[in-house]
Image (cartoon, rainbow, N blue to C red):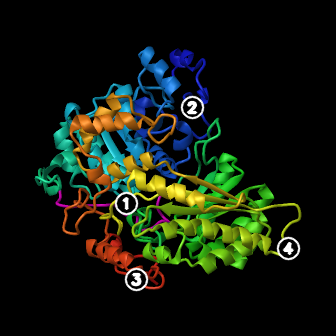
Amino acid sequence: MRKEWEYLLDGVQKPARYTGGELGSAMKDKAQIKVRYAFCFPDSYEIGMSHLGMKILYGLVNERKDAWCERVFAPWVDMEEKMRANGVPLYALESGDPISEFDLIGFTLQYELSYSNVLNMLDLAGVPLRSRDRTALTPLVIGGGPCACNPEPLADFFDIFLPGEGEEVTNELIDLLIAHKEKGSTKLEFLRDAAKIEGVYVPAFYDVSYHTDGTLQAVTPKETAPTKVKKRVIADLDSVYFPKQFVVPFVDVVHDRAVAEVFRGCIRGCRFCQAGFIYRPIREKSSDTVNRQAKALCDSTGYDEISLCSLSTSDYSEVETLLPQLLSWAPDEKINVSLPSLRVDNFSESLMEELKKVRKSGLTFAPEAGTQRLRDAINKNVTEEEVLSTAAQAFRGGWTSVKLYFMMGLPTETLEDVAGIAELAQKVVNEFYHNPDKPKGKGVTVSVSVASFVPKPFTPFQWEPQDTMEQLAEKQKYLMENVHSGKIRVSWHQPHTSFLEGVFARGDRKLCDVLEEAWKRGCKFDGWDEFFRFDAWMQAFEACGVDPAFYANRRRDFSELLPWEHLDYGIRRAFLAEENRKAHESVTSPNCRQKCSACGAARLNGGHCDAIQ
C-alpha cells in the first residue's frame, strides 16, 4: 500500500486486508518487468486468500523475470466508501499501484453472485466496464475459473476468457502480449492472434442471434475465432508448476492452511455436480509428489495444517499410501493433516485409523438426497446402509459430530424425498446411541446442511427447470416439520439467492445489460446476505425487459441450442442427454473406475484418463 494512502485505514475493519507486505508476497523491480498482471478475486480478502487457483497462478507468473503478478481483492464496503470519497482507485497489494496501469486485469470467476463485484471493481479502478470502450491494447480484462464454462452473462465486459486450466495458457498469453507490445500492435491485432491459442475465447469475435421466443438461434465466429473453443487441460500433474510457498496472511482467512492438490476431476458422475464434469478427465499426482509439495509448503509458510485438495479425496487411488508418508513427518512437526471431501462408500477402517492419529474434529459426508430412489436419480451411488455403517464406524472411533450435506429441489424430487432427509439424519443419531462404547457424558450432533439445487451447464441436468422460490420455501418448511430431535441442526440456502444464481448460471448475453443495471442500483457482494438486494435485482430485470424465470425455471428441450455450446469442455452432449434420461428413470451409471461411460473428456488429453486402467 502506498504510504500516502495509509490514512484510509483509520477506522476500517481489518486494515491488514489492504496493506500487503505479507510473508511470501512477491516484490519486483518495475524497470525489469514487461507485463504486469493484476489477479483480481471479486470477493473479500478472507475468501480470496483461501483460493488455491489464485495461489498457483500467482506463483506461476512470478516465477518469470519479465512479469509481475499482484493480488487485488474487493474492498469491504467501509474501505470502498473511503476510497471513493478520497479519489483513491483500486490498487494492487504488492506495489500499491492502481490496477488501471496494469497490462492484464484477470478475474477468477468462482461464483455467479460475484459478478456485480467484477463491475464494481472495474469502476473503482477507473477502467471502462465494456470491452468496446477500452480501445487501447492494455489493460486487457480476462476471466477464468469454473464460471468461465458459461461466460455469456459477462461477455460484453471481458476481452478474453480462459476456459479450462490456466497453468500453460497463462504463460502463452503473456508471451504473446509481450511480443505485441514490442511491435506496437493494436488491441484488435493482439486479439486476433490470441484467439488462435487453444483455450482462449474472445467473446467479441462471435455474433449471437436469437429466435423470436428468446432462445438462442446461432453463435457465429468471425475474425480468427474457431467454431468451438476447447478448454485447456494439463496432461501431467506431477510435472506441472505448483508453488513451494504461499502468501501467509496477517489476518485469519476462511481456509488458513497449506493445501496440497492430489488430483483433478472426479470418478463419480453425480448428475447435479458441475465440477465433477468440467474438471474431467481424471488426472492424479503421485503420492511422492503430493508428499514433497506438502512438506515444502509447511516448511516455507509455518502452517500447522495441511489439507489434501480434490473433489473426492478418498477416491484418490494412492490415499492409503500417501497418509503414512505424511504422518512420517507431520505429527513430529505438530502439523495436522486434513482430508475433506470423504465418501461414505470408501471410508475404510484403515483410513479411519489413520485419521484418528491426526484429528478428532467433525466428519462431513454428502448423501445429497434423503431417499434411495432420488440418490439413484442423481447417480450418487451411495446407499442408506453405507451412510449408517460409516456413521457407526466413526462413532466407534470416537467421533461425536457428523455433518451431512443434502440438496433440495433436485429433478424428480417429491415431498417424500424431503422427509427422507430428516429420517436419514434421525437414523444417524440413533446409530450413535446404539454404540455400546459411546463416550460417557457426551451427546451427538448431526448437522444437516441443505443447499438449493441450481442446474448448471455441462451437466446432465443442464436442461432441467429449477424449483421456484415458492416451491423451495415450502419444501424447507416441510423438512423442519419432519425433524423431531434436538440433536439435529438444520441450515439451508436462501431461495432468492439460489434463484439469481440459477439465472446467471444458464444465462446469455442479454443478461449483460441486467447486470450493469443492477450494479448501478447498488448491487454488490450479492453472495453475502447482509448486502443482497433482491428488490434491486428484480427492478433491473424489469428495466431491461428480461424475465429471469426464462433462465431459471424453464425446461429446455434437448434440441435447443444452449448459450455455452460453442465452448468445448470435452463432455459429449449425447452422453449428458442419456444421463438425463437415466435420471428420470432412477437408473444409475457406474463410476469411472468400474466402467468407462465414454463421456468424451479424455479426447482433450490425448485420449488419456487416469480412471481408465
Q: Amino acid at mark 2?
A: Arg
Tag in front: 2 or 1? 1
The CA distance from mark 2 to mark 4 is 47 Å
The CA distance from mark 4 to mark 3 is 42 Å
Q: Amino acid at mark 1?
A: Pro
Tag shown at residue 437: 4
Q: Residues within 10 Å of mark 2 (few under 14, many from 20)?
A: many
Q: Is 451 in front, or is 469? A: 469
Residue 449 point in image, percent of width and height:
58, 57
Residue 228 point in image, percent of width and height:
21, 61
The CA distance from mark 3 to mark 1 is 24 Å
In the displayed structure image, the side of residue 144 where residue 339 appears, left or right: right
* Residue contact between numbered discs 2 and 4, judged by CB atoms under 8 Å: no
Query: Which residue matches tag 1?
Result: 455
Query: Which residue matches tag 3?
Result: 596
Numbered disc 4: secondary structure: loop
Q: Amino acid at mark 4?
A: Asp
Name the residue located 62 percent from the left edge and 69 percent from the top edge: 423
Q: Is residue 557 visible?
A: yes
User: Which stretch appears magenta?
Assistant: 226-241
Tag in front: 2 or 4? 4
Q: Residues within 10 Å of mark 1 (few under 14, many from 20)?
A: many
Q: Amino acid at mark 3?
A: Cys
Numbered disc 3: secondary structure: loop
